[in-house]
Image: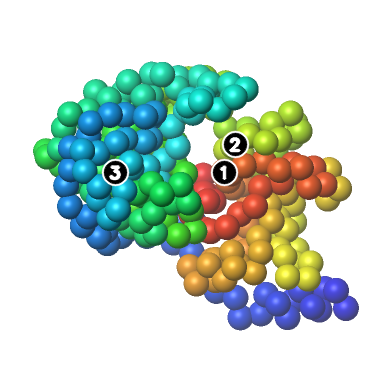
Amino acid sequence: MQERRRAWWWRGAALALLLVVAAPLAARAGDALRDLGAARVVSVVDGDTVVLDRAVDGADQVRLVGIQAPKLPLGRKGFAKWPLGDESKAALEALVLDKSVKLAAGGRSMDRHGRLLAHLYLADGTWVQGRMLETGMARVYTFPDNRALAADMYAREAAARAAGRGIWALPFYAVRGPDGLAADIGTFQVVEGRVLRVAKVRNLVYVNYGRNWRDDFTLRLDSRAQRLFRDAGVDLLYLQGRVIRVRGWLRDRNGPLIDVTHPEQVEVP
């Protein structure tokens, strides 16, 4: 009965996947961005946050959407600075400080902290996110409501990782295997391994990397995430038996778990 229910659920699911090397499952080329105007950068907070000389859409602080730079404490008590945090901030300062930048949004334009979410471009056309990724001073970090240019960002990150630039030269940021992740609970990780089984339990889909679901590494997708995968033409059952790379915050739920919320969170190496 359980197998029949699974078969019914998968019936009619799309099988069309256009896969390229080291690409996100839903690589959308040429995403349209909305022009937000221009402003001058007057200070740099860290490797992915800047302050403008004027408010744009009600905010003068900008979070460089689509990337995650090494984190700094920024007044958070007990927060340990991530390796290359200072270097990443310095790299962004060298790129944009006291310069005019064009701003563009590819999804939701404001975060819960009241910061503008935008892609930044210099007067000569340099894409700031792209430069930070290709120099190894940041890694890709997309969200369900901010997925524009993911394919381009992954390509630049992959080149930096292959060359061992910046963060990719350090064990702290290394791509992990699915075993031995218990010590990394509560951290953001990139994990690569072979999927053993994909199953649906009630309204959730679980992607398991081991035989014992009580302690193995698992991905979990809720109904909203499943819908985004279907809309992208991705059959989750396709992942069974394949090596994939996924990124996100590790939680402890019957072993290490990452909640997958959108297709761009997953790559096929």
| Residue position marked by numbered label 3 in the rendering | 60
Residue under the point 32% across and 20% down: 90
Task: Using the image as rendered, state which of residue 230 and residue 261 is in the foreground.
Answer: 261
Q: In which quarter of the image is the N terminus?
A: bottom right
Q: Which comes before the other along the chain, label 1 or label 2?
A: 2
Q: What element carries label 1?
A: strand
Task: Using the image as rendered, state which of residue 36 and residue 27 is in the foreground.
Answer: 36
Task: Work out whether residue 233 can be spotted.
Answer: no
**CA–CA distance in space, label 3 to label 1:** 29 Å
Residue under the point 51% across and 25% down: 75
Contact, mark 1 vs mark 2 (Cβ under 8 Å): yes
| Residue position marked by numbered label 2 in the rendering | 189
Q: In this view, does 35 lie to the left or right of 21?
A: left
Task: Using the image as rendered, state which of residue 45 and residue 130 is in the foreground.
Answer: 45
Task: Work out whether residue 227 can be spotted.
Answer: yes
How far from the left and from the top, in percent, is residue 248?
58, 44
Colour pattern of the rendering: rainbow
Residue under the point 16% across and 32% down: 99
How far from the left and from the top, in percent, is residue 169?
48, 20
Residue under the point 25% across and 50% down: 56
How far from the left and from the top, in percent, is residue 203?
73, 70
Q: Which comes before the other along the chain, label 3 or label 1?
A: 3
Q: Which comes before the other along the chain, label 2 or label 3?
A: 3
The correct choice, above or below, for 73 with respect to 100 in the image is above
Quarter where residue 145 is shown: bottom left
Give the foreground label among 2 and 3.
Answer: 3
Q: What element carries label 2?
A: strand
Kindly identify which numbered label has been placed on residue 247.
1
